[in-house]
């Protein structure tokens, strides 16, 4: 986990009231169109939402520009096709905390900036594409269109020494969601990669800020290969589309993950997270090689301790506690 000490700034970067209300109007228009597949008239939409025609027309125009195919049918409107982009209005109740971008350098950069400007707990920054997506240990995270790339800003009530629990919670929740939604044998490779059939489906990165010896923020960045094709650039990677043979609705996946992760995080000190995580890992018991920027170690992964460190039994029988590194399964 990268660590930043800083002096907090007071100017807040939040979404404007108009933006939030426009997200809610779009959500309501979509709800009416979905409930009326045989077409809903503009007058009906205006009456239902008690809003004037010009406002509704502007929002419908923006929905069309965002990829929703809304056709005129008779004197009504029909929703013919919806994109699976994770727009804020697709997450009821989260309209004010989801920030969606077509392109960013890295969601980690903006998340850090927003965390330092006092954005609320569980603010989510999503980008369709990242020009300089980052992986752990100074690697690049290829972020082609079709994947899910997001960072969650958390303000946990945890001692800095326990911040690693959040990464374990996030990877545990994601493995469970992938198992439940798609019946995949998704497993966690220490510390937080999600693998299926030994191929990497998701990776996580975290950063934290400390102020007066307390955690000010922990930012968890998650990349999931969904409908993108990472295999050309990363031979050991795989996408959900490739595994399942069909495109996946990224909105549903992200929504389940955010709901479940927030439930695990809310008010909890995550005391028992590592024992639970151990049920979902494929690392313990395997022969592994751990590579850090400077060193590498080999041995059998015997356990993961309360600090999140991997306990490695080396060739001479000695036990080594490894705090970070890239783990390769033998
Ligand atoms: C790794 O496996 O090395 C970690 C990959 C983390 C990728 C995500 S994508 C969203 C967020 N923004 C980034 O630049 N990186 C993380």
Image (cartoon, rainbow, N blue to C red):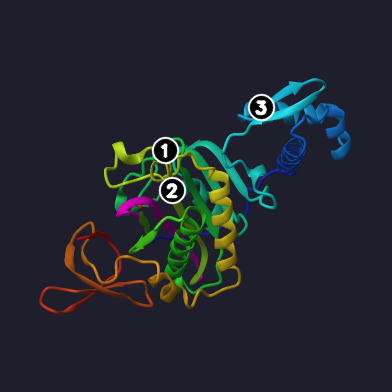
Residue at image position (18%, 61%) is: 295
Quadrant in the picture for the N terminus:
bottom left
Which residue shows up at 80% across the image and 25% down it?
76
Q: Is residue 159 above or below residue 5?
A: below
- Secondary structure at badge 3 equals helix
Q: Is residue 39 left or right of residue 231?
A: right
Residue 52, position in %: x, y? 87, 31
Q: Position of residue 238 (x, y in %)?
A: 35, 45
Image quarter hosting the C terminus: bottom left
Q: Is 225 placed above or below 44 here?
A: below
Query: Which residue is labeled 3 in the image?
Result: 64
In this view, 222 is above or below 162: above
Given residues 81 and 37, the one toward you in this image is 37
Q: Is residue 291 visible?
A: no
The secondary structure that most of the magenta stretch takes on is: strand
Q: Secondary structure at mark 1?
A: loop
Q: Decide which of tag 1 and tag 3 comes sooner along the chain.
A: 3
Locate residue 280 relative to residue 260 in the image: left or right. left
Q: Is residue 201 magenta?
A: yes
CB-based contact (under 8 Å), mark 2 and mark 1: no
* Residue count near mark 3 (Cα–Cα under 10 Å), binned few <14, some 14–19, many ≥20: some
Res 228 label: 1
Q: Nearer the viewer, residue 213 or 323?
A: 323
Q: Which residue is mark 2?
A: 224
Extent of the magenta region: 196-212
């Amino acid at each position: 986990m990268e660590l930043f000490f800083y002096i907090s700034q007071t100017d807040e970067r939040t979404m404007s009231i108009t933006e939030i209300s426009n997200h809610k109007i779009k959500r309501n228009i979509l709800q009416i169109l979905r409930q009326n597949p045989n077409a809903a008239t503009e007058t009906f939409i205006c009456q239902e939402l008690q809003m004037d025609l010009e406002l509704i027309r502007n929002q419908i125009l923006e929905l069309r520009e965002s990829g929703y195919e809304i056709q005129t049918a008779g004197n009504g409107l029909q929703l013919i096709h919806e994109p699976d982009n994770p727009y804020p209005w697709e997450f009821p109740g989260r309209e004010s905390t989801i920030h969606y971008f077509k392109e960013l350098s890295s969601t980690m950069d903006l998340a850090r900036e927003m965390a330092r400007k006092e954005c609320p707990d569980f603010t989510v920054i999503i980008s369709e594409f990242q020009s300089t997506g980052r992986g752990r240990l100074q690697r690049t995270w290829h972020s082609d269109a079709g994947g899910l790339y997001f960072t969650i800003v958390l303000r946990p009530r945890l001692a800095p020494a326990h911040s690693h629990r959040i990464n374990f919670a996030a990877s545990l929740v994601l493995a469970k969601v992938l198992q439940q939604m798609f019946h995949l044998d998704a497993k966690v490779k220490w510390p937080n990669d999600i693998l299926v059939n030994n191929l990497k489906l998701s990776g996580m990165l975290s950063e934290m800020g400390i102020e007066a010896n307390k955690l000010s923020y922990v930012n968890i960045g998650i990349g999931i290969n969904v409908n993108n094709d990472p295999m050309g650039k990363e031979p050991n990677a795989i996408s959900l589309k490739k595994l399942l043979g069909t495109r996946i609705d990224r909105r549903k996946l992200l929504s389940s993950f955010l709901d479940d992760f927030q439930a695990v995080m809310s008010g909890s000190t995550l005391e028992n997270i590592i024992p639970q995580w151990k049920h979902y890992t494929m690392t313990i018991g395997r022969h592994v090689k751990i590579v850090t920027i400077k060193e590498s170690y080999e041995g059998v992964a015997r356990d993961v301790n309360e600090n999140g460190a991997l306990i490695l039994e080396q060739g001479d029988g000695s036990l080594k506690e490894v705090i970070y590194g890239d783990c390769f399964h033998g």
